[in-house]
Image: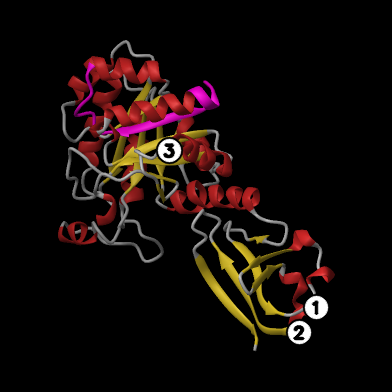
Amino acid sequence: MRKLPTGSVVIGNLPKGCELCQRGLKTVIFVTGLCFSRCFYCPLSRERRRDVFLINEVKLSYKENDFTSKLIAEIYRSASLGASLTGGDPLVRPERTLKVIKILKEFFGEKFHIHMYTTGKSLNSDIVNKLEKAGLDELRIHPVARELVEIASVLKGSSLNYGLEIPSLPGKERDMLDLIRKAEKLGFMFVNINELEFSEENSIALLQRGYVMSQDYISAVGSKETAIRVMEELKKEGTSMDIHFCPVIIKDKYQTGLRHFRRGQIVAKPYEKVTDSGTLISLEVETDFPLKDIPRVLYEKRGKVLVTSTHLIPLLKDKTVSLKIVERQSSAEGLITYVEPIYP
């Protein structure tokens, strides 16, 4: 059992999807917010518990004529080597899910790694066959809506790499062990144990059940320790499965953080500075200063405002009506995250 620099704890090897995710090389495709289950610990926001489609937090209409081009463009901007299909449960909308997988495999090739999450409720031989043909590489199953043995019988003989995806619930150590042992006997290849996450949507349900949020992050007290004890017991038993404990912080710091940084590096204009978190910093100026004195690649006109590099503050400070430093997200919306007035 080893601890990775990201904070993950692993027995055996990281699943391929997790390996790319921790390097920020996975685009997250939210296929739908609809789900067959109503897990009390689901952290999904109220806004996302509907039939919406998002790619890297950007809403996209599945019915748009340019859906395919927008999907591909976002992956290029993020320099991703794979995609994660999540929800909800993507198999509530199987045709949509299959279409997305086919688009990605046809455009980016077989090496573009795709993994998907599902409750397994709607899995049958026909769906599994279609997922294989479309090009799905890895299937992660959260078995809350169906017996594990039924799911295993459907997946038997499949070419998919499939495993369990479960939360680490303090007080449920014995149940977790029983489920993982059963999964190993049934041929599941890996287990991802996720640290229990507090969110605005699930916090009341978690508190009502006695869970407490840790002081240093949005994880539940005792969740990590429960997962480690489960892994230690399985290691003693000589498990042959790959088992991975994934801390909550990985999603923000590595999965999302590194992807934002890489995207920022790709989309930044010559006059923009990329921060460690992937946001873009520029200077916004109202000025009559002759533009011929500034290299054309170092500015952009947006109405009366000149957007340029912060390196030009000394040059422009005494020749402006207003001057401010602006920090934006590197996403298509360019949401402003910080403004610092310099003058007046």
**Is any atom of residue 36 visible in this view?**
yes
Q: Quadrant of the C terminus?
A: bottom right
Residue 19 rendering spot, x and y as whole percentages: 51, 35
- Can you name the residue that lies furthest to the top here? 157
Marks 2/3: CA–CA distance = 45 Å
Q: Toward which corner of the image does residue 219 lie, by quadrant?
A: bottom left
Check disc 3 and report the residue beneath it.
Answer: 67
Residue 237 visible in rendering: no
Q: Position of residue 55 (x, y in %)?
A: 43, 44
Which mark sits nearer the N-terminus, 2 or 3? Answer: 3
The residues bearing labels 2 and 1 have C-alpha atoms spaced at a distance of 8 Å
Residue range highlighted in magenta:
106-124
Badge 1 density bin: few <14, some 14–19, many ≥20, Cα 10 Å: few
Residue 18 higher or lower than 323, as above or below: above
The image position of residue 85, as x and y in percent, is: 38, 36
Identify the coloring. Answer: secondary structure
Which secondary structure, mark 1? helix
Sequence-wise, the earlier of marks 3 and 1 is 3
Q: Position of residue 118 (x, y in %)?
A: 28, 33
Q: Amino acid at mark 1?
A: Leu
Q: Is residue 202 left or right of residue 229?
A: left
Task: Give left or right: position of 252 versus 289.
Answer: left
Q: Amino acid at mark 2?
A: Lys
Residue 269 image-quadrant placement? bottom right
Q: Which residue is mark 2?
A: 319
**Left or right relative to 11: residue 273:** right
Q: Which mark is residue 315?
A: 1
At mark 2, the secondary structure is helix
